[in-house]
Amino acid sequence: MKKKLFGTDGIRGEANVFPMLPELALQVGRAIGYLFKNHAFSKVIIGKDTRLSGYIFEASLVAGLCSMGVSTWLVGPLPTPAIAFLTKDMRADAGIMISASHNPYYDNGIKIFDKEGFKLSDELEEKIENLIFDEKFREIRQYKADLGRAFRIKDAIGRYAVHLKSSIPTYINFEGLKVVIDCANGAAYQVGPQTLEELGAEVISLGCSPNGLNINDNCGALFPQKLKEKVLKSGANLGIALDGDGDRIVIVDEKGTLVDGDELLALFGIELKNKGQLLKNTVVGTVMSNLGLEKFLVERGINFIRTSVGDRYVVLKLREIGGILGGETSGHIIFLDKATTGDGLLTALKVMALMKEKEKPLSELVHLFDKYPQVIKSVKVKYKKPIEEVEGLLEKIRLVEKRLNGKGRILIRPSGTEPKYRIMVEGEKEDLIEEIAEELSQYILQKLN
């Protein structure tokens, strides 16, 4: 069965347009309640980011879960990794995050975690879809005193903040560090500045005034220009930009230079290896990870494994091999001993702790390798299909790839969250890879629009 609902990272789309309909969210809640209820007092944690439509899907999920006899614990706006953590910490049977991550405010999504805080497998997602579209399942429900209840948890922010702070050695505090944090008017707008301040940092906040419509709007990880300007103007030691649900991060050093996920993997890969803590001597990245990162790590005796795009695939591989460190270029960094998913704030704290431990500015800790020039384009289309089904595309890729002379890569994939194709071309000559990326973009536009 081909998936109808789930993409790379849960269910996602424009609010009040299929699949992000309140009536479908109700069925998602019912299916989760049916699959995860295993005792009389089963409960599910529900969190969300700051989108206006979050109220719609929170209410729908609560209704679906309670109709199946499962109680819900509502925690309000908190980052995705906080929901993963709280699900396990509070002994819930599952966790749900209502968010469309880095997408515009009019989109929304549903991410689901199991009781251990891990994103669901493809098999479990398929079971949920099967139940949702099964007419017979619609007759299954609870009655009378067996219905579930809904509660609001008031100390969720504090619980998550304590968890974050516990990841830093107690002998380290952030006194003397000035940090700019841009929370993208999203889920981390409260817990982000609060945690940094509690650890002693001087904090300048941006993107911490959500109104339901301004999430990711010219701010956060996708738009770091204001962050760079503020870091330079204020003389801050670093800047931190999170996305709307707080699971990814972009960092700016004290000189205003961007630090992406690949550079962070290089930094922590070497640091953990030097301390004898890099389990399996392996770092896990994705097909989008820069060739320069792979070369840097391999030359230093560290294995590098690539997965499909999506931090859940990185986590799956880490669990499979017994590794500890992985992530994506986009800024999802996983420390599997501390978190079950990418966590932007956790990553920020570890970077700042390293700055204090080494007593060095960030610019002297990062930028460890030369990146291969890389061009990434997004092509919006009317409809998506596998690239092998796009007329002549595979042959087109083979032809243009020859122009790289074996010193580069081409990757084209349909987005798992938007009606777009992602095109990545990597090679030694910037003019050539830009030319190839544009040529492929035009080809896809011609065939699918």
Image: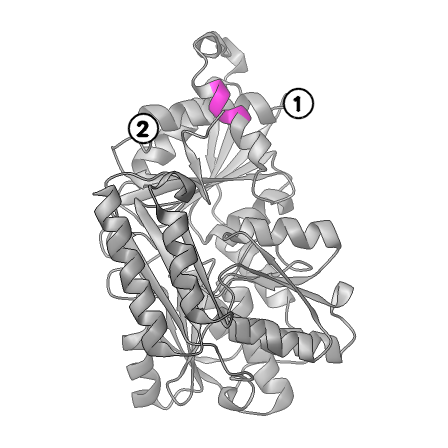
Q: Please give the residue where the numbered disc 2 appears in the rendered image.
A: 22
Circles 2 and 1 in contact, beta carbons < 8 Å: no
Q: Nearer the viewer, residue 291 or 146?
A: 291
Query: Per the image, is 193 magenta?
Result: no
What's under tag 1, amino acid-wise? His
Q: Residues within 10 Å of mark 1 (few under 14, many from 20)?
A: few
Q: Nearer the viewer, mark 2 or mark 1?
A: 2
Query: 201 above or below 334?
Result: below
Q: Give the side of residue 73 with respect to residue 107, left or right.
A: right
Q: Position of residue 405 (x, y in %)?
A: 47, 71
Query: 8 above or below 193?
Result: above
Residue 33 appears anywhere in the view: yes
Asked which secondary structure carries label 2, the reply is helix
Task: Name the residue at 72% across, 59% down.
Answer: 323
Q: Please give the residue where the numbered disc 1 appears in the rendered image.
A: 39
Give residue 219's quadrant in the image.
bottom left
For the C terminus, the image quarter is top left
Q: Give the side of residue 113 with respect to residue 377, left or right.
A: right
Q: Residues within 10 Å of mark 2 (few under 14, many from 20)?
A: many
Mark number, residue 230: none
Query: 121 above or below 163?
Result: above
Q: Give the side of residue 145 with respect to residue 179, left or right.
A: right
Query: 272 above or below 386?
Result: below
Q: Position of residue 419 (x, y in %)?
A: 30, 44
Asked which secondary structure carries label 1, the reply is loop
Q: Nearer the viewer, residue 446 or 239?
A: 446
Q: Mainly helix, strand or loop, the magenta region?
A: helix
Q: Position of residue 202 (x, y in %)?
A: 43, 82
Q: Nearer the viewer, residue 392 or 294?
A: 392
Q: Which range is magenta?
A: 127-131
Alpha carbon separation for disc pair 2 and 1: 27 Å
